[in-house]
Image (spheres, coloured by chain):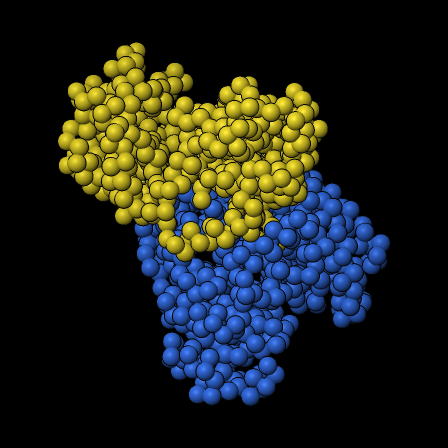
Chain colours: A blue, B yellow
Amino acid sequence: MNADVTAHPHPKNDAFLAACEAVVGATNLITGDDMARYLTDWRGRFTGHARAVVRPADTAQVAAIVRHCHERRVPVVPQGGNTGLVLGSVPDASGAAIVLSLARLNRIREVDPVNDTLTAEAGCLLQQVQDAAAAAGRLFPLSLASEGSCTLGGNLSTNAGGTAVLRYGNARELALGLEVVTADGRIWNGLRGLRKDNTGYDLRNLFIGAEGTLGIITAAVVKLFAQPAARVTALFALDAPPQALSLLALARQRCDATLTGFELMSDICLQLVEKHFPQLRTPFNARHPQYVLLELSDAESDAHAASLLEAVASSAMAQGLVRDAVVASSLPQSASIWALREHISMAQAVEGKNIKHDIAVPISRIADFIAETDALLQQAFPGCRMVSFGHLGDGNLHYNVSAPLGQDDQVFLQQQAAVNLIVHDQVHKFGGSISAEHGLGALKREEIRRYKSGTEMDMMMAIKRALDPLNLMNPGKVL
Amino acid sequence: MNADVTAHPHPKNDAFLAACEAVVGATNLITGDDMARYLTDWRGRFTGHARAVVRPADTAQVAAIVRHCHERRVPVVPQGGNTGLVLGSVPDASGAAIVLSLARLNRIREVDPVNDTLTAEAGCLLQQVQDAAAAAGRLFPLSLASEGSCTLGGNLSTNAGGTAVLRYGNARELALGLEVVTADGRIWNGLRGLRKDNTGYDLRNLFIGAEGTLGIITAAVVKLFAQPAARVTALFALDAPPQALSLLALARQRCDATLTGFELMSDICLQLVEKHFPQLRTPFNARHPQYVLLELSDAESDAHAASLLEAVASSAMAQGLVRDAVVASSLPQSASIWALREHISMAQAVEGKNIKHDIAVPISRIADFIAETDALLQQAFPGCRMVSFGHLGDGNLHYNVSAPLGQDDQVFLQQQAAVNLIVHDQVHKFGGSISAEHGLGALKREEIRRYKSGTEMDMMMAIKRALDPLNLMNPGKVL
């Protein structure tokens, strides 16, 4: 295999590559140095090797390529925007696999505003799907930081989350039907646009979140929704996570499905934002330990949404849940509140590297989880700084740990395994997930064995063997 | 096997039954005539045979019984309330299987109003789960005609639908985690109460809707919601299904998630109701071809919900979508509108037997489906009467065909296979499902092969073999 990696054989001298070239044409079979951008992961932590990058034009070509791979036992690494965070879309170091890029499968096949569905190919950018829905006067609510680069196929294969899960669910909840190329190169047309269908096993949800290890999603039917008439935002200052949970319960009761965002941020997060982006300021006169950003999406009007939010705010003040509150009265004010939330990741990056965790626990246990885990980490790494924020309404925290002031980041990063062990053991103890939004990929494949039962791992292995008996679909990921 | 069926051996003379008795005790091992109510399906169409009915008390006992079955190759038919409509929960005629009743697993294990989750065992009645949620001030929105008799395990195993799917989804969308006894008698604890968890294959959704053919659901974590502050109902009179679709689009735009019910009923349905239940009357002065029942569940107040609904009604009148409209101004008025809808099934039954279909098509194609299929049926069976109604907002119709006036029902019922073929071929042509809510069971197991691709059937078979290699879990159902 190493010979392959270094020699980059011309298709003419390699029957398998010649067969691939016959399917996709010479310009869409990439070998040698031109493969570089397909081989390195989004965060630049790992570069793999591949026999070739193959860029089919449509589902039939994907199936033909997979059949060639199946025949010759060549592993296939499906790739969309390659924006994943768990090394799920890059090949391993062996050079045995091809990267199968879905980028050219980028057609919106159908928008049906009456059925409230859209059918798109896997290589469509998320933003392209959002735009196509908007052009038909509808909303496709999935929204992520990488929406200009990530693809629908990747969103579904990793069951992406994002900022509107509270109201609309994860990618899984937004998909009604799939088209899939199976491990032996057949095409399954499961592109159903139905809200109700009870005719056998739920294959759709098996491929969603499987990170390309069971087959390749080539297209999907997704749900659309009404565009909200108004969006309003508020920022609340409060003492501690338990008050945030009471505020969440109050907002859910009063606003029900209009509640679309509920983000918790600690003061240390906003101090970092203000330090590195001095144009951004919290709207309060004093500092407070915790902040909650709350957003409503309303079907009626700005005035209705604002009055609903003001009612929540005055109730929360009256109940002593919050220390202060600001309801945005204009779009710019709303944008400046969101800017605080959205600059946390960048502020962290400017401050230095830290150890990140994408975790979820039951919402009712978040406060205890934070208190107990913060204390364990302080005990093990005195002075370490907790840069925690996230989608509290979904029970999902970005629970990040920075070096103590004065300690070199690189020195602290050497403790990563020990920090992960403390955090993830705590997550497990609290009935949580060590990967809420990002998947397992190659990054957490070993670690998950510590937390899943043998029974669950055995069932996953049995399904993998049933649908991909030759272990050719994205090997080394998930399982 | 026939000897078993007729002789009903005493456990003392049957090592397998003795082993089962040692697990559940003599009073919970039922043989002989006492098995009767477990062997006949809800509609009384089929009576099977069984070696015994076994009633374990808890999950550990379920696992122990399944291990005995696995060791001795005895098929297992899991049963909840036995209210299914597709012969999914009764054994076949061979007498080889045991019926494993989940009825004694009826504990509410936990209600967590902050996490908005409830953990219940499979044998809990649906109404018991609704009541436990309500006692904690929360809503469990799954609601079916049989809610006083059906069980949560059966609801999940058949992915039940019901009257609130438009807002809250099917049973599938309401479950966060499961506990399952596998085909070899192991216990999988997947009772996670998380909104986000991306750590491997979606086993939960594989067991949901599998009708007990892959393993036995013994408990589940389900989602709870805020109790709505108000529910208001309206009845609209209109010309034809296309106007109903335009009204649906208008209501979705104006009301978004507050829209919880959207039911279409043809005049023939309401004429039957008025004929057989003379105390029930449509609230209009004239007859109209079609009617829509619309319901809103509102987080604010009766007044807010009523004003929203009145705005929809006046818009619909102004656009000429509807011929008349009544917004219920009181609970009794609302109840009398719902009574029209709820008495359709009974009115049909009094009128005589008819040929029922539980179908779904994309919402945008419903009007064409109805027009074209009605015409095909009239051509094949002149004078047959269409008693169609259903959850238009979900694309789900109860598309029922009655004998022509004057023709004996039993004569018409002999045409059932021919009627089904016309209707289901049309459903398939329109991209629909021949079982929207009820599952396949033994009833539609053969028929589904006509409509599913070989690729899909092969994947389903591969999964069945992977998780139940001895084919002991509810054999003869689904596949």
A28 versus B421 height, above or below = below
Q: Nearer the viewer, residue A372 or A402?
A: A372
Q: Nearer the viewer, residue B45 or A225?
A: B45
On the image, which quarter does residue B258 sit in?
A: top left
A301 versus B341 height, above or below = below
Residue that protrudes farthest toward the top in the picture: B279
Q: Which residue shows up at 50% across the image and 40% down it?
A: B475
Q: In what quadrant of the picture does the C terminus of chain A appear? A: bottom right
Q: Nearer the viewer, residue A427 or B82?
A: B82
Q: Which residue shows up at 82% across the image and 59% down it?
A: A381
A71 versus A441 height, above or below = below
Q: For this view, does B68 lie left or right of residue B161? A: right
x, y percent for residue B432: 33, 45
Q: Which residue shows up at 52% across the image and 41% down it?
A: B213
Q: For this view, does A27 lie left or right of residue B412? A: right
Q: For this view, does A422 lie left or right of residue B379? A: right
Q: In what quadrant of the picture does the N terminus of chain A appear? A: bottom right
x, y percent for residue B296: 40, 30
State whether residue B293 appears in this view: yes
Total number of numbered labels? Answer: 0
Q: Which residue shows up at 49% across the image and 82% down it?
A: A31
State whether residue A146 appears in this view: no
x, y percent for residue A249: 60, 36
A374 versus B371 height, above or below = below
x, y percent for residue A176: 42, 49
Q: Nearer the viewer, residue A421 or A292?
A: A421
